[in-house]
Every structure is written in structure tokens, then in C-alpha cells.
Amino acid sequence: VQLQASGGGLVQAGGSLRLSCKVSGINFKIYDIGWYRQAPGKQRELVAAISSGGSTNYTDSVKGRFTVSRDNARRTVYLQMNSLKPEDTAVYYCNVQARSSSFWGQGTLVTVSS
């Protein structure tokens, strides 16, 4: 199982980025996918998740600003991030729980300047 995250970068506060996570090695459409982030000196936290049926949930700090979506044909999950704030600065990871294991992408760095 492999997850390839991309789309991070440097953006000014108020800007937008779209992260992508391409998944291979599993029957993608039947699995829930999560986006996590880890800021320097902090624990990794769940930011958003999307179920196999398309249901979504978000941590309170990103509600109304971030949108998670999936394209089963492309085996890809997206995280659209709008109105970015300096406190969103972190390495963002995608994750899938499959075959009794937890699989992580390599992470993509998002830096939001004030």
C-alpha cells in the first residue's frame, strides 16, 4: 500500500492550497481516508476525513475553510484549504487503515506566512 501526498508549499495568510493524496495497492473505493497534520513541537492531529461513502468530518479549527473530497476513478483524495492561517503551518499526511495496519503518505509541508 502506498500513499503519495503532494501540493504543499508556501502561501500567504488568506491564501489557498489544494493537497492531493494518490493511493495504490488497495481497493481504494471501500476505504475511509484521513488527512492529518503535525506542526513543529506538536502531536499529529486529524484534520479531515472522508468515508468510502463520501461522508466527511473536520476538526473544529478548519471547519468552513477546508474541504475534503475524493475521486475514486483517480484513486485520489483532495484537501482544499482556503483562508489559510499561520497556525495551519504543518506537515500534512494522508492515512488509510487497511489490512489491520495503518499506512501513511510521506507528508507534504504547508507553510503559511503572516
Image (spheres, rainbow, N blue to C red):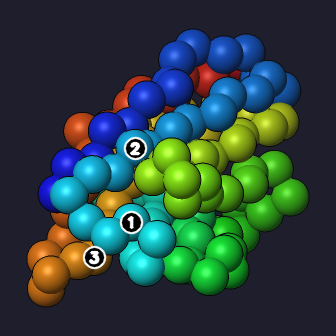
Callout 2: few (<14), some (14-19), or many (20+) C-alpha neighbours within 10 Å?
Answer: some
Query: Toward which corner of the image does residue 41 lie, by quadrant?
Result: top left
**Closer-to-camera residue (76/83):** 76
Which residue does the numbered mark 2 point to in the structure image? 22
At 43% from the left edge and 79% from the top edge, which residue is drawn?
30
Instruction: Check residue 59 in the rendering and tell me which mark sits there, or answer none.
Output: none
Name above or below for residue 34 compared with residue 74.
Answer: below
Quadrant of the frame with the C terminus: top right
Compare marks 1 and 3 and give the one earlier in the sequence: 1
At label 1, the amino acid type is: Phe
In percent of width and height, residue 71 lies at: 60, 54
Q: Which mark is residue 28?
A: 1
- Relative to 9, does residue 103 appear above or below in the rendering? below
Percent position of residue 74, x then y: 51, 46
Q: Position of residue 73 (x, y in %)?
A: 54, 53
Task: Count every numbered label the image shows and give the total.
Answer: 3
Q: CA distance from mark 3 to mark 2?
A: 15 Å
The quarter of the rendered structure image containing the N terminus is bottom left
Q: Amino acid at mark 3?
A: Gln
The residue where tag 3 is placed is 97
Which SS class for mark 3?
A: strand
